[in-house]
Image (tube, coloured by chain):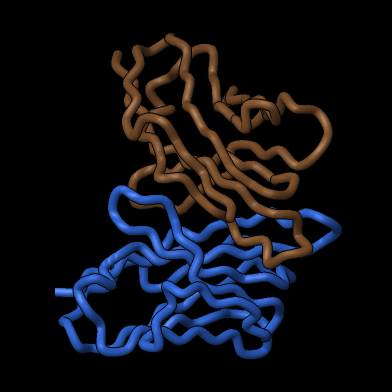
Chain colours: A blue, B brown
Amino acid sequence: DTGVSQNPRHKITKRGQNVTFRCDPISEHNRLYWYRQTLGQGPEFLTYFQNEAQLEKSRLLSDRFSAERPKGSFSTLEIQRTEQGDSAMYLCASSLLSGRYNEQFFGPGTRLTVL
Amino acid sequence: AQSVTQLGSHVSVSEGALVLLRCNYSSSVPPYLFWYVQYPNQGLQLLLKYTTGATLVKGINGFEAEFKKSETSFHLTKPSAHMSDAAEYFCAVSEESGSQGNLIFGKGTKLSVKP
């Protein structure tokens, strides 16, 4: 088990382009979370999946953002028509919902720079 | 609504000195509380957590934190700082897993350790 992995680690794009990030959770983890972290701030919740179902979306997730988790395994986060304000670190976390508490394990993040 | 306040965006201590990073939370339900550490260009690593039971919790790397319900605090301490402790530290709160269980983070405290 190698933990949560995210690809790419860095992405530089021009304003208006579309980008897609991938997250591979720890195998057998049924919950997957996406967070966004901007400079000088803590991570902010974007959305989460339980298996393949997307159960919650934050109001930070504008309609230019879409996330999927086909087959309940890896997940992708796509940003369409990127804006400079989308520049941030995008973090993925996974957990195994068991009992009352689920510990989230974080990946290394994808740093997005929009020029 | 839940929230986390970390007092002091930057704390500097000398090697061997006490480390104290402050965290106050607000939550309408019994919270789960966490401290994470983030090294440059890396994801978040869990230091310690409070779920139920003993209010003094011990974590990795010699850190510990005490849950004080009356003060709504969960301050992080380490008796003797090492150079390797220099990083950013985030306090987070979560509701019980009956909800989506996403984490609400503070803005972080950057710890510097002077030789």
**In front here: B55 or A31?**
B55
Image x and y of residue B57, in percent: 71, 28
Task: Give the quarter of the image for residue B11.
Answer: top left
**In front here: A95 or A25?**
A95
Image x and y of residue A37, in percent: 38, 59
From the viewer's perspective, is residue B33 above or below residue B95? above
Q: Quadrant of the N terminus of chain B?
A: bottom right
| Residue at figure coordinates x 32%, y 89% from the top left | A80
From the viewer's perspective, is residue A86 above or below residue B15? below
Compared across the picture, whether B77 is left or right of A101 comes to left
| Residue at figure coordinates x 71%, y 38% from the top left | B50
Task: Give the quarter of the image for residue A27.
Answer: bottom right
Image x and y of residue B83, in percent: 38, 22
| Residue at figure coordinates x 46%, y 18% from the top left | B19
| Residue at figure coordinates x 47%, y 39% from the top left | B5
**In front here: A46 or B15?**
A46
Image x and y of residue B54, in percent: 80, 28
